[in-house]
Amino acid sequence: MTLVDINSLEPLADPLEQAKRAAAYMAVDQNVPKDAKFVGIGSGSTVVYAAERIGQLPNKDQFICIPTSFQSKQLIFDNDLKFGTIDQYLNVDITFDGADEVDSRLNCIKGGGACLFQEKLVASCSKKLVIIADYRKKSPRYLAENWRKGIPIEVVPIAWIKVKNDLINFGARSVQLRQGGTQKAGPVVTDNGNFIMDADFGVIDGDIKVLNDKIRGLVGVVETGLFVDMVEKAYFGNKDGSVTILFGENVEETI
Ligand SMILES: O=C[C@H](O)[C@H](O)[C@H](O)COP(=O)(O)O
């Protein structure tokens, strides 16, 4: 079985979905190692296309896919991929994941879909983390310039008020307990049984590592959606069908 060329695919009706697919397919084609044994599957709407493309790879039965959420476990099954978990396999060759915003140094905000903890767990066990996203996620410079909903933070439920006060003392302008919306009365509950708080610290133009470490150090915080120095490269699908690849601080190429 040979892989269908990206350029010969039928275009998708929605240009945003087209951009996501272009980024995901190119990232998979360029980055899955020939001898891969373990591949991490991130979460969100862009990763759907990465799982689809991984499911088309001629050597897909050679590696085991590790999920980062309930959603990505289903993607692994739906695309007929081999399944394993991070508590079985700790050495992941490469992980593909989405992001809510990526800065010019490849730091990112994740967790818009409440999956940040398992995503960070799998990323921390991966030799490479490759981000796939559409053009809206590429920050002009700093994090939170585009993503204005705040930094997602996973919190143990009984600690949420305490953590909210701590975050305000750290300078957060607002802290929201994320709500389930029309489909769920009350707060969002993560795949790990926790809550998500969205803390708005404004544009993050200071030391992002210091901020991240401070938040992570709070009793009650499980993990943050700040991914600092973890990403190897990021693929952004553009409106015109091209893909911009960010390799390092302001080093990029558009194909
Ligand atoms: O919790 C969700 C994840 O961090 C997603 O990877 C992130 O929100 C990006 O999702 P999407 O590809 O749907 O924009």
Image: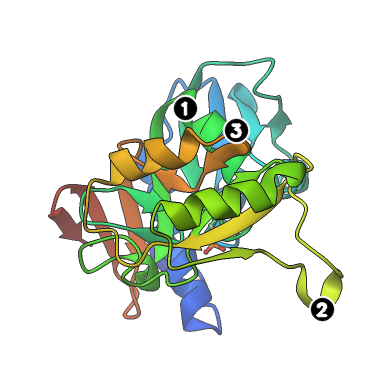
The span from disc 2 to disc 1 (Cα, nearest Å) is 34 Å
Q: Residues within 10 Å of mark 2 (few under 14, many from 20)?
A: few
**Helix, strand or loop for disc 3:** helix
Tell me which amino acid carries mark 3.
Answer: Lys
**Residue 162 vertical position relative to residue 213 in the rendered view, above or below:** below
Q: Nearer the viewer, residue 109 or 31?
A: 109
Please give the residue where the numbered disc 1 appears in the rendered image: 124
Relative height, residue 10 to residue 231 (above, below): below
Instruction: Identify which amino acid the numbered label 1 is placed on.
Output: Ser
Q: Element at badge 2?
A: helix
Residue carrying label 3: 60
- Ligand 1 within 8 Å, label 2 CB: no
Query: Split into 4 quadrants, where in the image is the N terminus?
Result: top right
> Mark number for residue 182?
2
Q: Amino acid at mark 2?
A: Thr
Quadrant of ligand 1: it is: bottom right
Relative depth, front residue between 3 and 135: 135
Residue name at image x 49 percent, y 70 percent: 149
Numbered circle sitting on residue 166: none
Image quarter of residue 132:
bottom left
Q: Secondary structure at mark 1?
A: helix
